């Protein structure tokens, strides 16, 4: 397998993990006290992408005491607009890596046809 293919596959796996984090955050947008996570991508040597998932501990909006039975609770700290932008970007990056794999496959097929 070529280095280009390894890099693109690594990117696909990384963006898949990033998509899972975004989906989890979005699914819990209405869960009181939920703390969102962030997937951070970093280049690895010699090729590839490493994903680090970390929690974001910013407070959510405090909920009124009458809604929580007197307990101090806060809403989730998930910003749905931010998650949607992240989702759109992840989709485009995923598509770009898939396109690299497709082009590599086509080039390999052409090379085999020329040699045969």
Image: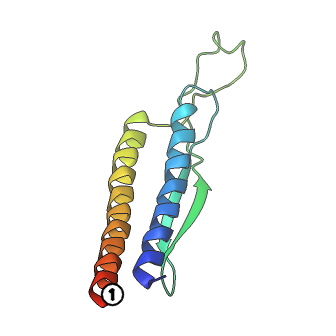
Q: Position of residue 95 (x, y in %)?
A: 34, 56
Q: Residue at x 44, y 84 (%)?
A: 3
Q: Quadrant of the C terminus?
A: bottom left
The residue beneath circle 1 is 116
- Above or below, comparing residue 44 to residue 99 in the picture: below
Q: Residue at x 52, y 62 (%)?
A: 13
Residue 53: quarter of image: bottom right
Q: Position of residue 25 (x, y in %)?
A: 54, 39
- Above or below, comparing residue 21 to residue 110 in the picture: above
Count every numbered label the image shows and give the total: 1
Residue 113: quarter of image: bottom left
Q: Residue at x 72, y 15 (%)?
A: 70
Q: Residue at x 48, y 66 (%)?
A: 41
- Above or below, comparing residue 55 to residue 75 in the picture: below
- Considering every residue shown, the one lying at the far front of the view is 116
Q: Is residue 7 left or right of residue 64?
A: left
Q: Is residue 107 left or right of residue 48?
A: left
């Amino acid at each position: 397998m070529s280095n280009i293919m390894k890099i693109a596959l690594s990117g696909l796996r990384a963006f898949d993990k990033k998509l899972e984090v975004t989906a989890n955050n979005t699914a819990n947008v209405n869960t009181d006290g939920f703390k969102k996570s962030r997937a951070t991508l970093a280049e690895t040597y010699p090729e590839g992408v490493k994903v680090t998932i970390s929690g974001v501990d910013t407070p959510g909006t405090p909920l009124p005491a009458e809604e929580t039975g007197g307990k101090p609770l806060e809403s989730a700290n998930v910003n749905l607009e931010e998650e949607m932008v992240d989702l759109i970007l992840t989709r485009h990056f995923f598509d770009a890596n898939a396109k690299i794999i497709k082009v590599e496959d086509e080039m390999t097929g052409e090379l085999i046809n020329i040699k045969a």
